[in-house]
Image (cartoon, helix red, strand yellow):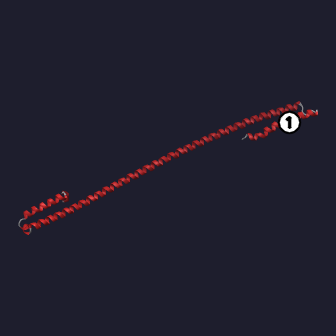
């Protein structure tokens, strides 16, 4: 890039190099030496110095260009490293978010399962309680019916005269009612 700035200088030096030859050839043709040997030596020295300066400038420009390329390469490598670090960090954060979401979903499912299990147990306990109450009511009704039948079969005199027999029949009916409903139906 910097070499393009030197192109006009190179062209000028090249033209200067041809100038003494052309001038010398022109003077040779006229027979009048316009340029002396000292002038040629001085011009040649100037050309040599200019060439040396240009070579020095080219070396410096090349060194600056190489340094600039090296700096750009270093900056590019640093950018790539930063981009890779950012990509890895983003990937790590994404994995953490996904793991956290999975854990939350698992916790929600477990909580829902526990709540469902607790509701089933509550419903089962309620049904058992209702069944127990129904069994007790049925046992009471059956005992009342048995007592009623016992009174009807014995008649009125049995309760007045034969109380022991009526008590035995009532106890027997109560026992049958307890057996059919279970012992828990009547709290002894």
Residue 33 in the figure: left or right of residue 48 = right
Q: Nearer the viewer, residue 122 or 67?
A: 122
Q: Residue at x 77, y 35 (%)?
A: 53
Up-down relation of residue 42 to residue 148 (above or below): above
Q: Can residue 187 be seen at all in this image of the molecule?
A: no
Q: Residue at x 71, y 37 (%)?
A: 62
Q: Can residue 23 be seen at all in this image of the molecule?
A: yes
| x and y percentages locating residue 70 in the rendered image | 65, 38
Q: Nearer the viewer, residue 38 or 160?
A: 160
In the rendered image, the quadrant that contains the C terminus is bottom left
Up-down relation of residue 27 to residue 162 (above or below): above
Q: Secondary structure at mark 1?
A: helix
How packed mark 1 is, by other alpha carbons closer than 10 Å (few <14, some 14-19, many 20 or more), is few
Residue 141 in the figure: left or right of residue 168 = right
Q: Residue at x 75, y 41 (%)?
A: 5
Identify the residue under disc 1: 19
Quadrant of residue 50 within the rendered picture: top right
Up-down relation of residue 51 to residue 146 (above or below): above
| x and y percentages locating residue 40 in the rendered image | 86, 32
Residue 85 in the figure: left or right of residue 124 = right
| x and y percentages locating residue 15 in the rendered image | 83, 37
Extreme residue in the bottom direction = 156
Q: Residue at x 50, y 48 (%)?
A: 94
Q: Nearer the viewer, residue 102 or 78?
A: 102
């Amino acid at each position: 890039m910097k070499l393009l700035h030197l192109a006009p200088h190179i062209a000028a030096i090249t033209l200067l190099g041809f100038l003494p030859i052309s001038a010398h050839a022109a003077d040779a043709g006229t027979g009048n030496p316009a340029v002396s040997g000292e002038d040629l030596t001085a011009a040649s020295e100037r050309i040599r110095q200019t060439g040396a300066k240009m070579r020095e400038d080219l070396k410096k420009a090349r060194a600056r260009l190489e340094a600039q390329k090296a700096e750009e390469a270093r900056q590019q490598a640093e950018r790539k490293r930063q981009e890779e670090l950012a990509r890895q960090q983003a990937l790590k954060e994404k994995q953490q978010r996904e793991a956290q979401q999975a854990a939350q979903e698992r916790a929600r499912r477990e909580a829902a399962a526990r709540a469902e299990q607790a509701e089933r147990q509550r419903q089962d306990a309620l049904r058992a309680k209702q069944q127990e109450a129904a069994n007790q009511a049925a046992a009471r009704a059956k005992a009342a019916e048995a007592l009623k039948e016992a009174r009807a079969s014995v008649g009125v005199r049995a309760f007045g005269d034969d109380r022991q027999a009526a008590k035995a029949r009532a106890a027997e009916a109560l026992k049958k009612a307890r057996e059919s409903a279970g012992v828990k139906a009547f709290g002894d």
